[in-house]
Image: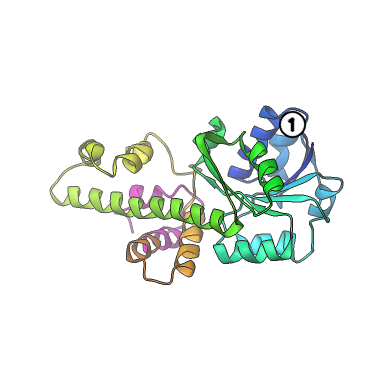
Protein backbone atom coordinates (compact mmCIF):
# COMPACT_ATOMS: atom_id res chain seq x y z
CA UNK A 1 0.00 0.00 0.00
CA UNK A 2 1.29 3.46 -0.91
CA UNK A 3 0.71 5.90 1.95
CA UNK A 4 1.31 9.64 2.00
CA UNK A 5 1.86 10.87 5.56
CA UNK A 6 1.63 14.62 6.08
CA UNK A 7 2.80 16.08 9.39
CA UNK A 8 5.74 14.43 11.13
CA UNK A 9 5.81 16.30 14.42
CA UNK A 10 6.16 14.47 17.71
CA UNK A 11 3.01 12.37 17.42
CA UNK A 12 2.95 12.15 13.63
CA UNK A 13 6.45 10.68 13.58
CA UNK A 14 5.44 7.92 16.00
CA UNK A 15 2.27 7.10 14.05
CA UNK A 16 4.15 6.93 10.76
CA UNK A 17 6.91 4.85 12.33
CA UNK A 18 4.43 2.31 13.68
CA UNK A 19 2.97 1.86 10.21
CA UNK A 20 6.42 1.41 8.69
CA UNK A 21 7.45 -1.11 11.31
CA UNK A 22 4.20 -2.99 11.94
CA UNK A 23 2.42 -3.13 8.58
CA UNK A 24 3.66 -5.32 5.74
CA UNK A 25 4.10 -3.93 2.26
CA UNK A 26 3.91 -0.25 3.16
CA UNK A 27 5.51 2.29 0.84
CA UNK A 28 5.46 5.67 2.55
CA UNK A 29 6.07 9.19 1.37
CA UNK A 30 6.32 11.82 4.09
CA UNK A 31 6.03 15.58 4.15
CA UNK A 32 6.52 18.09 6.94
CA UNK A 33 6.61 21.87 6.91
CA UNK A 34 10.07 21.64 8.52
CA UNK A 35 11.69 18.96 6.39
CA UNK A 36 14.40 18.11 8.93
CA UNK A 37 11.78 16.71 11.28
CA UNK A 38 10.90 14.05 8.71
CA UNK A 39 14.49 12.88 8.33
CA UNK A 40 14.33 10.10 10.97
CA UNK A 41 11.52 8.45 8.97
CA UNK A 42 13.51 8.79 5.75
CA UNK A 43 16.35 6.95 7.45
CA UNK A 44 13.86 4.18 8.31
CA UNK A 45 12.67 3.73 4.75
CA UNK A 46 10.22 6.52 3.92
CA UNK A 47 10.64 8.86 0.96
CA UNK A 48 10.67 12.61 1.57
CA UNK A 49 8.43 14.84 -0.56
CA UNK A 50 9.15 18.53 -1.09
CA UNK A 51 5.48 19.54 -1.12
CA UNK A 52 2.13 18.08 -0.02
CA UNK A 53 1.17 17.76 -3.69
CA UNK A 54 4.28 15.69 -4.38
CA UNK A 55 3.56 13.56 -1.32
CA UNK A 56 0.05 12.55 -2.36
CA UNK A 57 0.90 11.75 -5.98
CA UNK A 58 0.03 8.08 -6.57
CA UNK A 59 -0.94 7.56 -2.90
CA UNK A 60 -3.62 4.99 -2.12
CA UNK A 61 -4.20 6.39 1.37
CA UNK A 62 -3.40 9.85 2.73
CA UNK A 63 -2.86 10.36 6.47
CA UNK A 64 -2.57 13.76 8.11
CA UNK A 65 -1.26 14.56 11.58
CA UNK A 66 -1.23 18.36 11.74
CA UNK A 67 -1.30 20.81 14.65
CA UNK A 68 -4.90 21.94 14.35
CA UNK A 69 -7.90 22.58 12.11
CA UNK A 70 -6.46 25.74 10.57
CA UNK A 71 -3.46 23.74 9.38
CA UNK A 72 -5.81 21.18 7.84
CA UNK A 73 -7.56 23.94 5.94
CA UNK A 74 -4.28 25.43 4.73
CA UNK A 75 -2.58 22.18 3.73
CA UNK A 76 -5.52 20.08 2.54
CA UNK A 77 -8.86 21.84 2.09
CA UNK A 78 -7.95 25.11 0.40
CA UNK A 79 -5.62 23.56 -2.23
CA UNK A 80 -8.08 20.66 -2.73
CA UNK A 81 -5.22 18.28 -2.09
CA UNK A 82 -7.05 14.94 -1.87
CA UNK A 83 -7.40 13.16 -5.25
CA UNK A 84 -10.86 11.81 -6.04
CA UNK A 85 -11.55 8.44 -4.48
CA UNK A 86 -8.45 8.34 -2.26
CA UNK A 87 -9.12 7.67 1.44
CA UNK A 88 -8.02 10.53 3.68
CA UNK A 89 -7.41 9.59 7.32
CA UNK A 90 -7.03 12.67 9.50
CA UNK A 91 -5.58 12.18 12.99
CA UNK A 92 -5.45 15.93 13.76
CA UNK A 93 -7.39 17.04 16.83
CA UNK A 94 -10.31 19.13 15.55
CA UNK A 95 -13.76 20.13 16.78
CA UNK A 96 -16.92 18.29 15.72
CA UNK A 97 -17.86 21.27 13.52
CA UNK A 98 -14.43 21.14 11.88
CA UNK A 99 -14.88 17.42 11.24
CA UNK A 100 -18.28 18.01 9.67
CA UNK A 101 -16.77 20.73 7.48
CA UNK A 102 -13.94 18.47 6.29
CA UNK A 103 -16.29 15.55 5.66
CA UNK A 104 -18.53 17.80 3.56
CA UNK A 105 -15.53 19.03 1.56
CA UNK A 106 -13.93 15.62 0.95
CA UNK A 107 -16.22 12.60 0.62
CA UNK A 108 -13.43 10.16 1.50
CA UNK A 109 -12.70 11.84 4.84
CA UNK A 110 -12.16 9.59 7.85
CA UNK A 111 -11.47 11.22 11.20
CA UNK A 112 -9.17 9.11 13.37
CA UNK A 113 -7.87 11.11 16.34
CA UNK A 114 -5.60 9.33 18.79
CA UNK A 115 -5.74 9.43 22.58
CA UNK A 116 -2.51 9.27 24.54
CA UNK A 117 1.01 10.64 24.57
CA UNK A 118 4.36 9.62 23.10
CA UNK A 119 4.99 6.67 25.42
CA UNK A 120 1.81 4.79 24.47
CA UNK A 121 2.32 5.84 20.84
CA UNK A 122 5.73 4.16 20.73
CA UNK A 123 4.26 0.99 22.25
CA UNK A 124 1.18 0.89 20.02
CA UNK A 125 -1.14 1.42 23.00
CA UNK A 126 -3.00 4.58 22.05
CA UNK A 127 -6.75 4.94 22.00
CA UNK A 128 -8.12 5.63 18.52
CA UNK A 129 -11.57 6.74 17.40
CA UNK A 130 -12.28 6.08 13.72
CA UNK A 131 -15.27 7.98 12.36
CA UNK A 132 -17.00 7.86 9.00
CA UNK A 133 -20.40 6.64 7.71
CA UNK A 134 -18.56 4.71 4.95
CA UNK A 135 -18.23 1.15 6.29
CA UNK A 136 -15.52 0.12 3.84
CA UNK A 137 -13.33 3.14 4.53
CA UNK A 138 -13.85 2.77 8.27
CA UNK A 139 -12.63 -0.82 8.07
CA UNK A 140 -9.65 0.24 5.97
CA UNK A 141 -8.73 2.96 8.46
CA UNK A 142 -9.19 0.67 11.45
CA UNK A 143 -6.93 -1.92 9.84
CA UNK A 144 -4.16 0.67 9.65
CA UNK A 145 -4.93 2.08 13.09
CA UNK A 146 -4.40 -1.34 14.65
CA UNK A 147 -0.70 -0.45 14.57
CA UNK A 148 -1.41 2.49 16.89
CA UNK A 149 -4.07 1.17 19.26
CA UNK A 150 -3.89 -0.79 22.45
CA UNK A 151 -6.16 -3.75 23.15
CA UNK A 152 -9.82 -2.68 23.28
CA UNK A 153 -8.81 0.90 22.48
CA UNK A 154 -9.75 0.98 18.79
CA UNK A 155 -13.30 2.30 18.43
CA UNK A 156 -15.18 2.69 15.16
CA UNK A 157 -18.01 5.24 15.04
CA UNK A 158 -20.37 6.28 12.26
CA UNK A 159 -19.49 9.96 11.93
CA UNK A 160 -16.34 12.04 11.81
CA UNK A 161 -17.87 14.47 14.30
CA UNK A 162 -18.43 11.65 16.80
CA UNK A 163 -14.76 10.72 16.64
CA UNK A 164 -13.88 14.39 17.14
CA UNK A 165 -15.98 14.75 20.29
CA UNK A 166 -14.49 11.51 21.63
CA UNK A 167 -11.01 13.01 21.40
CA UNK A 168 -12.12 16.26 23.01
CA UNK A 169 -13.74 14.34 25.89
CA UNK A 170 -10.46 12.49 26.44
CA UNK A 171 -8.43 15.67 26.51
CA UNK A 172 -11.01 17.40 28.69
CA UNK A 173 -10.32 14.71 31.28
CA UNK A 174 -6.60 15.36 30.89
CA UNK A 175 -6.91 19.13 31.25
CA UNK A 176 -9.23 19.18 34.25
CA UNK A 177 -7.34 16.46 36.14
CA UNK A 178 -4.15 18.44 35.49
CA UNK A 179 -5.85 21.44 37.09
CA UNK A 180 -6.93 19.17 39.96
CA UNK A 181 -3.39 17.91 40.49
CA UNK A 182 -2.02 21.45 40.50
CA UNK A 183 -4.56 22.51 43.11
CA UNK A 184 -3.76 19.41 45.19
CA UNK A 185 -0.06 20.33 45.14
CA UNK A 186 -0.92 23.87 46.21
CA UNK A 187 -3.24 22.63 48.97
CA UNK A 188 -0.57 20.31 50.30
CA UNK A 189 2.01 23.08 50.18
CA UNK A 190 -0.33 25.23 52.29
CA UNK A 191 0.17 22.69 55.08
CA UNK A 192 3.92 22.43 54.53
CA UNK A 193 3.92 19.16 52.58
CA UNK A 194 6.48 18.75 49.82
CA UNK A 195 5.43 17.49 46.38
CA UNK A 196 6.69 13.93 46.92
CA UNK A 197 4.47 13.52 49.99
CA UNK A 198 1.45 14.96 48.18
CA UNK A 199 2.00 12.60 45.25
CA UNK A 200 2.22 9.63 47.61
CA UNK A 201 -1.00 10.62 49.36
CA UNK A 202 -2.80 11.05 46.04
CA UNK A 203 -2.01 7.46 45.05
CA UNK A 204 -5.28 6.20 46.57
CA UNK A 205 -7.42 8.96 45.04
CA UNK A 206 -9.05 9.72 41.74
CA UNK A 207 -6.05 11.86 40.83
CA UNK A 208 -3.66 8.90 40.94
CA UNK A 209 -3.54 8.48 37.13
CA UNK A 210 -2.41 12.02 36.34
CA UNK A 211 -0.20 12.14 39.46
CA UNK A 212 1.66 8.96 38.53
CA UNK A 213 1.95 9.98 34.86
CA UNK A 214 3.42 13.39 35.66
CA UNK A 215 5.36 12.55 38.84
CA UNK A 216 8.73 12.25 37.01
CA UNK A 217 8.38 15.85 35.84
CA UNK A 218 7.26 17.13 39.24
CA UNK A 219 10.11 15.39 41.10
CA UNK A 220 12.74 16.49 38.57
CA UNK A 221 13.46 13.07 37.07
CA UNK A 222 12.36 14.35 33.65
CA UNK A 223 12.72 17.73 31.99
CA UNK A 224 9.69 19.47 30.52
CA UNK A 225 11.68 20.16 27.35
CA UNK A 226 10.80 18.43 25.10
CA UNK A 227 8.38 16.31 27.16
CA UNK A 228 5.47 14.40 25.67
CA UNK A 229 2.46 16.70 25.16
CA UNK A 230 3.04 20.42 24.94
CA UNK A 231 1.29 23.27 26.70
CA UNK A 232 0.53 24.79 23.29
CA UNK A 233 -1.13 21.61 22.04
CA UNK A 234 -3.32 21.01 25.11
CA UNK A 235 -4.26 24.70 25.28
CA UNK A 236 -5.34 24.58 21.63
CA UNK A 237 -7.42 21.46 22.27
CA UNK A 238 -8.99 22.98 25.39
CA UNK A 239 -10.08 26.04 23.43
CA UNK A 240 -11.71 23.76 20.85
CA UNK A 241 -13.71 22.28 23.74
CA UNK A 242 -14.79 25.74 24.89
CA UNK A 243 -15.90 26.61 21.36
CA UNK A 244 -17.86 23.35 21.07
CA UNK A 245 -19.74 23.46 24.38
CA UNK A 246 -23.04 25.31 24.64
CA UNK A 247 -22.62 25.52 28.42
CA UNK A 248 -19.87 26.98 30.64
CA UNK A 249 -16.98 24.66 31.49
CA UNK A 250 -15.47 26.35 34.57
CA UNK A 251 -12.91 23.67 35.41
CA UNK A 252 -11.66 23.76 31.84
CA UNK A 253 -11.54 27.55 31.91
CA UNK A 254 -9.32 27.39 34.98
CA UNK A 255 -7.00 24.94 33.21
CA UNK A 256 -6.79 27.20 30.16
CA UNK A 257 -5.71 30.02 32.46
CA UNK A 258 -2.83 27.86 33.71
CA UNK A 259 -1.77 27.01 30.17
CA UNK A 260 -1.86 30.63 29.11
CA UNK A 261 0.30 31.56 32.10
CA UNK A 262 2.89 29.01 30.97
CA UNK A 263 2.75 30.32 27.43
CA UNK A 264 3.38 33.83 28.70
CA UNK A 265 6.40 32.50 30.62
CA UNK A 266 7.83 30.91 27.46
CA UNK A 267 6.99 27.29 28.22
CA UNK A 268 4.42 26.78 25.45
CA UNK A 269 6.52 24.26 23.50
CA UNK A 270 7.33 22.25 26.62
CA UNK A 271 5.36 19.48 28.30
CA UNK A 272 2.15 20.64 29.96
CA UNK A 273 3.69 19.42 33.21
CA UNK A 274 5.15 22.93 33.18
CA UNK A 275 2.04 24.00 35.09
CA UNK A 276 3.29 21.88 38.02
CA UNK A 277 7.03 22.41 37.64
CA UNK A 278 6.83 26.21 37.39
CA UNK A 279 3.77 26.68 39.59
CA UNK A 280 5.55 28.95 42.06
CA UNK A 281 7.60 30.90 39.55
CA UNK A 282 4.98 33.01 37.80
Image coordinates of residue 261 in percent, x first then y, are 39, 62
Left of 270 or right of it: where is 200? Answer: left
Left of 156 or right of it: where is 32? Answer: right
Residue 268 shows in this picture = no
Total tally of numbered discs in the picture: 1
Residue occupying image coordinates x 61% and y 56%: 160
Residue 6 colored magenta?
A: no
Q: Nearer the viewer, residue 143 or 193?
A: 143
Which quarter of the figure is the N terminus placed in?
A: top right
Label 1 Cα neighbours within 10 Å, binned few <14 / some 14-19 / many ≥20: few
Residue occupying image coordinates x 67% and y 48%: 135
Location of residue 218 (image quadrant): top left
Image coordinates of residue 208 in percent, x first then y, are 29, 40
Q: Nearer the viewer, residue 152 or 190?
A: 152
- Residue denoted by label 1: 43
Location of residue 220 (image quadrant): top left
Q: Secondary structure at mark 1?
A: helix
Which quarter of the figure is the C terminus placed in?
A: bottom left
Residue extending furthest right? 58
Left of 54 or right of it: where is 142? Answer: left
Which region shows up in magenta?
257-282
Residue occupying image coordinates x 71% and y 35%: 41
Q: Nearer the viewer, residue 221 or 281?
A: 221
Residue 278 colored magenta?
A: yes
Image coordinates of residue 170 in percent, x first then y, are 45, 50
Amino acid sequence: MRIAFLGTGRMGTELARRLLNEQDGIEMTVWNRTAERAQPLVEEGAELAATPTDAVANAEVIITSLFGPDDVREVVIEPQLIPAGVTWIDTTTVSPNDAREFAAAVETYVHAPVVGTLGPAREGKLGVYVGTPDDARREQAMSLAESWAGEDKLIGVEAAATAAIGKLLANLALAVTAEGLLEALQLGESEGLDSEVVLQMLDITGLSFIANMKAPFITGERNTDPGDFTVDALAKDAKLMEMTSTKPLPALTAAIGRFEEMQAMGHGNQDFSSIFVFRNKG
